[in-house]
Amino acid sequence: MAERVQCLYRVSTTKQVDHNDQNQANIPMQRKACRGFAKKMGWIIVGEEQETGVSGFKVSADDRDKLQLVKEKAEQKKFDILLVYMFDRLFDMAQNLMTERTNENKEYRTMPLNTTGQSLLSGNVFCGHCGGRLVLTTNGKVYRQPDGTPLKKKRFRYICYNKTRHRTDCDGQTGYTMHILDDIVVNILHQVFDKMKSATSDMIVGNACQKQMALLQADLKRARTENTKANTDYESLKAEVLKAVQGKSALPMDVLNELLEETRQRVLDTSRRVTELTMELEDENSKLEEFRSEFERIATWSEIFDSSDTATKKMICGYIIKRVTVCRDYKLAVDFTINVEQFLNGIDSVTQAEVNDLPMAQ
């Protein structure tokens, strides 16, 4: 017996939905993907629900009516499988992480080889004077307590590998105290988190993306209109040809055949254009939803960052910050990963120039 499937579609904002002829909200890309997957698996869809304008990050499960309705159906055993469409980059992120950790990419690696240790930065911090990677070292120093008892303390520092190994000339500092540099980066991360938490969806997407989507939708509407007209003209000409065969048309048969072929070609061309624009619009919708999903993931990280252990903080930092370049006196230049850079540009916030002017921890 085929599995019974309940589908649940969701988008974070009402601006991410299309509308059908009855002006009802619709999420065609997710619906098409889930129906296609169910068909491929031999499953039967017994129900479909959709949430429009519901953020999975901002709205709790208890306050999501459609989710509660699906839960009730599950408790009543009305379906066997819950099918949802996910824009999840965890697999891609894991693949990229594995690729970066290979020996072939060691010169370009910006992610940590492992998450052990006490430092926040690993693999993505570089000397601003020679460009060499900074590596973490520890050494001990013995202090005498008031009663004369020796106390050994460890000191953690990021040091320039090129300078300490004399691989190239470097006029920068040999090393930077770990907790000072880490505190500066944490301060920058907090500013990024604060900006992103205060952002609206319009700020995230940006005017350029909204305009692109509007242009595509307008082009698709125009193409559909032209295709409808071409099909209507084609059917009219076929009827006229029938009249000509019966001797009831005022137009010569050769003229009708020529017009019929031209119109048929117009039908094919406009149909092809509708298909191309539909696919392009679906692709843009997919990218947009993935973009929003990535934003929500980073927004979630902002909530857990301060309470996380060092290993988690290190991975979060690695996915947000692509490169930290350090010069004398702890002057920093920070390059964010492409998505974070897009988010910050989208809300007209922290630019590369502003990052260099951020207050430094003392």
Image (cartoon, grey):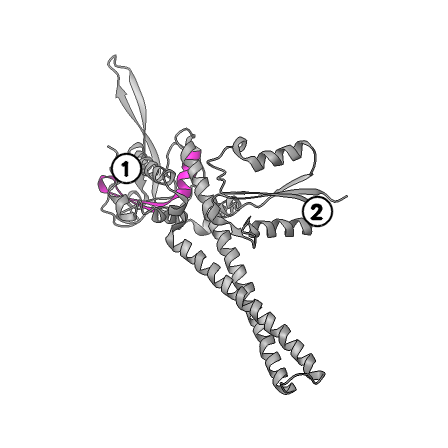
Expressed as whole percent of the image width and height from the top left, the position of residue 225 reads 53, 65
| Amino acid type, mark 1 | Tyr
SS at circle 2: loop
Q: Residue furthest top?
A: 147
Question: How far from the left and from the top, in percent, is residue 61?
Answer: 53, 33
65 or 272, which is in the foreground? 65
| Tag shown at residue 43 | 2
Q: Is residue 237 above or below residue 359?
A: below
Q: Quadrant of residue 209?
A: bottom left
Quick check: can you spot residue 258?
yes
Q: Is residue 247 left or right of residue 193?
A: right
Q: Amino acid at mark 2?
A: Trp
Residue 295 horizontal side relative to residue 265, left or right: left
Distance, label 2 to label 1, CA atoms, is 60 Å
Quarter of the N terminus within the rendering? top right
Q: How far from the left and from the top, in percent, is residue 271?
A: 57, 67
In the rendered image, is residue 113 in sight? Answer: no
Magenta region: 312-335
| Residue at numbered disc 1 | 176
